[in-house]
Amino acid sequence: MVDFNKLQKPVLISGIPAGLISVIPFIHCLCCVWLILFGFLSAYLFKKDTGTLEIEDGVISGALTGLVAFVIMMILSIIFIFFKVGISPLMGEDMAMQGIMSGFSLLFILFTGLIQIIVFPIFGAIGGIIGAVLLKDKELSEQNPR
Amino acid sequence: MINPRSRRYNITAYTMILLAVVLWDTSLVVAPYFAYVGGIYQSISDIIYFNFHFLCHQMPERSLFILGNKMPVCLRCAGIYFGFLIGTIAYPFIRGLETRDIPHKWILIIALLPVGIDGLTQLVGLRQSTNDLRVVTGTILGVLSAFFIVPAFLQVYDEMCNFLRKKLND
């Protein structure tokens, strides 16, 4: 099983910027790629720190990165809503402009939080898997140089 | 000879991931349908649209319309998600549930290249992609990525079961 102490640094280094970036509306132009990239970064940093990277390490480091990003995004969103500054992803001003939002409520935000607490770690984990797949062969070739 | 317990675990883990993917893809079709029906279903539709806006730009010109309402993701994302469903369904027939081997990294690179080139050249303004190209490149990535994500999930599920079993025995 993965050593969680070794995960702290890569997860925080990649998860905090991922959370901060998630409040930028333009970032959604990249579809889900930004979250996957930070999951990949987390796996890369884990490999750099420990020298090994198994698939489960990639999955867990990526998923935890997504979870940290979700927490940061929620905190920033609540701050933005409370102080009524900037554009919060939870306020969905871009959605309101498109005329597909019928209104906001606490229940709505709660539902969104419940869904995104699963979605963010899933996409982070996908980035971690990609990282583990792409970096694992490199590790083997380093061990057996030709 | 396959251990009956591990076979049961494999089927359980695979069913979980398949159901999650089916639910995910169903919500893409259900959202515009609920928006069309209206009433109380409109709120459910709003929640689905809003939650997908974290993952997609949702530009109408790059989306498929169902009953006059656009899908909650663009055609490239829809291609990835429906392709992933095809890949997940095909996975046990092609690879089997017992294997945990991940295909070679070049298959993943080949899967990422069409989407990467198409998306990046458009993003920097070199050219404009078409919806057909978005669907095709997205579907290639979706189908092939299932062959990396499904075994990884099965492996993590194994690890979790072993970890919990060990904890319960201690």
Image (cartoon, grey):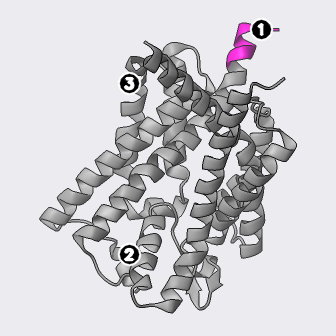
Residue at the (77%, 8%) spot, across then down: A145
Q: Earlier in the sequence, mark 2 or mark 1?
A: 2
Quick one: A53 or A45, which is closer to the camera? A53
Name which residue type carries label 2: Asp
**In whole angstroms, how far apart are the C-alphas of marks 2 and 3?**
34 Å
Name which residue type carries label 3: Lys
* Residue A142 on the magenta span: yes
Magenta span of residues: A139-146
Look at the image and tell me whether residue A62 can be seen: yes
Q: Secondary structure at mark 2?
A: helix
In this picture, is B82 found above or below A99? above
Q: Secondary structure at mark 1?
A: loop
**In whole angstroms, how far apart are the C-alphas of marks 3 and 1?**
29 Å
Q: Main secondary structure of the magenta part?
A: helix
- Give the letter of the chain under mark 3: A
The residue that label 1 is drawn on is A145
Percent of width and height locating residue B56: 52, 65
Quadrant where the N terminus of chain B is found in the figure: top right
In this picture, is B64 found above or below A18? below
**Do pointers 2 and 3 mark residues of a single chain?**
yes
Q: Earlier in the sequence, mark 2 or mark 3?
A: 3
Percent of width and height locating residue B159: 57, 25
Position of residue B39 in the picture relative to residue B116 (left or right): left
The residue that label 3 is drawn on is A9
Residue at the (31%, 46%) spot, across then down: A71
The residue that label 2 is drawn on is A94
In this picture, is B108 found above or below B73? above
